Image (cartoon, grey):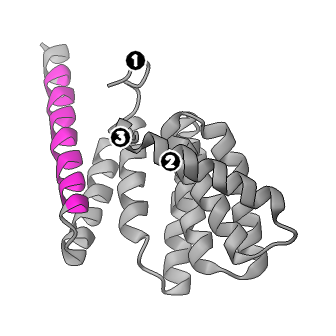
Amino acid sequence: MVAGESEFFRRFRFPDAHLEKVLREIAGDQAAIACAAEASPVTVEALIRLGFNLTPLGREAEAVAYLESALAMARQLGEPGQEIRTLLHLGTARQYLGEHEQAQLLFGAGLAKSAEYGIDDQVHYLLHHRGRCYAEQGQLHDARACLEQALTLRQQIGDPRFIASSQDALAELAQLLLLCLLAHHRSKH
């Protein structure tokens, strides 16, 4: 864990081997946005990708600015899939800025929009990220409920990486719950 990140529950960072590619993507997307003359799904996609790529680099404030633009543009264009993805990434960026309540509102909005539009492909991400946010807030039972729902969906999807990620999060959360119970038990005696 990087120093200063102990307050985060399983914070995502890019592996060093991917950094050069990510930085090239960021530069390309920034150039594309600078040249964009009007709102378009292509521009929204570049804004979303910027938010996604900047957050794991510790550049959450920049990510939020791009993602807020993406959200407004996706709504203006009537692009529900992009709106949902933006809510996910904006929630994550806000979470890593320590704005947990705002992050929870964004994750909740993403889940509500997924249900409203009948678009399910981001639900497991939204639940997983919401669960991690709950863990950081000390709401361990809510965290477990979200992570268990995410795992169920991920098992249905069948992607081993996502399944393992949720299983690992649940295992780490179980350790946290145990430590809390032990601490509570000791404080009573």
Of callouts 2 and 3, which one flags the residue occurring earlier in the amino acid sequence? 3
Say what amino acid the circle numbered 1 marks: Ala
Query: Where does the N terminus fall, quadrant-wise?
Result: top left
Label 2: element kind: helix
Q: Which residues are magenta?
A: 161-184
Would residue 130 be seen by someone viewing this image from the given angle?
A: yes
Say what amino acid the circle numbered 2 marks: Val
Of callouts 3 and 1, which one flags the residue occurring earlier in the amino acid sequence? 1
Give the left or right position of residue 181, taking residue 143 as reference: left
Q: From the image, tell me which residue sits under label 2.
A: 22
Q: Nearer the viewer, residue 78 or 188?
A: 78
Residue 159 in the magenta stretch? The answer is no
Q: Is residue 70 above or below residue 41?
A: above
Give the left or right position of residue 25, taking residue 146 as reference: right
Label 1: element kind: loop
Residue 177 in the magenta stretch? The answer is yes
Label 3: element kind: helix
Residue sitting at x 35%, y 67%: 124
Picture coordinates of residue 78 (x, y %)? 71, 82
Give the left or right position of residue 49, taking residue 166 as reference: right
Say what amino acid the circle numbered 3 marks: Ala
Which of label 2 and label 1 is nearer to you?
2
Picture coordinates of residue 10 (x, y %)? 32, 39
Picture coordinates of residue 65 (x, y %)? 73, 47
The image quadrant of residue 101 is top right
Q: From the image, tell me which residue sits under label 3.
A: 17
